[in-house]
Amino acid sequence: MNTDTDVIFISHGGGPRPLLGGPGHREMVDQLTKFAGTLSKPSAILVISAHWEESLPTVTAGAHPQLIYDYYGFPPEAYSIEYPCPGEPELARQVYQALEQAGIPARLDHERGFDHGLFVPLKLMYPEADIPCVQLSLVNSLDAGAHLAIGHALQALDYDNLLVIGSGFSFHNMAAFFSAETPEIRASNRAFEDWLEETCADTAMQESARAERLAHWDRAPHARFCHPREEHLLPLHVCYGLANKPTDSHMSATILGKKAGMFYWKMKAPR
């Protein structure tokens, strides 16, 4: 990585709900809005979304991707949300080449649009929709080590003033979101979040140990309760694989009644 890059893993909330109002996302909306104001405006944004899985890591390469309303059961206004940001084919090409050069077969997709893992948080963070965006898929094996390797490969990117966003959710048990809160659910949520914060933020931890913990995240306390399926956690693995250091700052918000984390890394180019 030959340029300064901001990397952040965010918990993006439930579908389009953050854009529709309501108290369940108020903390998240406030945090993302304020956090964006602390960053220099990026030249482009690369988003790794929990809502796109392919057999190979795949990159949106179109110049003007449409939006994909990949949710159901919401009021009509959820299907008329607009976020007309352009694509960035040159960044897409760099992402593809970085993966291929690392021995990770990849694919460019010139037709796919942007799903809500991109347009919901970015409409909060950068409502002007004037920053070019590219989206990178997860791999449908959901292998944690493979996603750490994808992030590591992205260190080869040489794109000035890039923002990389891992758009997921550090707690993603859908049944628990809509169940009555109990002391057991609360304790399980907190225990996993504490483990995740320690794993990402402990400056005394060796990077090999940090990577090992993330590769075997399912050994963490209550891991499979918090993530019955891990697609919403894996964008964090890509972010850490890219940063390869402890987080520079972290935040937490109560989202739909559950504690959820966000992690930020500042990557400095060699001087």
Image (cartoon, rainbow, N blue to C red):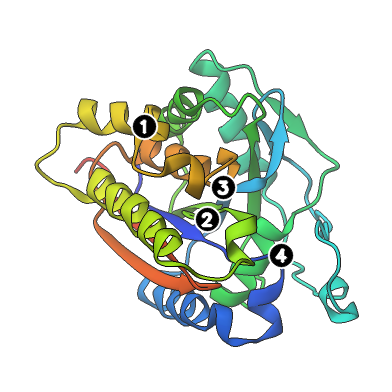
Instruction: Name the residue tied to disc 3.
Output: 232
**Alpha carbon separation for disc pair 2 and 4:** 23 Å
Instruction: Name the residue tied to disc 2.
Output: 169
Name the amino acid type tagged 1: Arg
Name the amino acid type tagged 2: Phe
Which quarter of the rendered picture does the N terminus lie within?
top left
Q: Residue at x 73, y 31 (%)?
A: 108
Instruction: Name the residue tied to disc 4.
Output: 85
Residue 52 found in image quarter: top right
**Alpha carbon separation for disc pair 3 and 2:** 5 Å
Q: Are marks 1 and 2 in contact (CB under 8 Å)?
A: no
Q: Are marks 3 and 2 in contact (CB under 8 Å)?
A: yes
For marks 2 and 4, the one nearer the N-term is 4
Farthest-out residue, bottom: 22
Name the amino acid type tagged 4: Cys
Q: Secondary structure at mark 2?
A: loop
**Alpha carbon separation for disc pair 1 and 2:** 18 Å
Q: Residue at x 57, y 34 (%)?
A: 95
Instruction: Name the residue tied to disc 1.
Output: 219
The label nearer to you, 1 versus 4, is 1
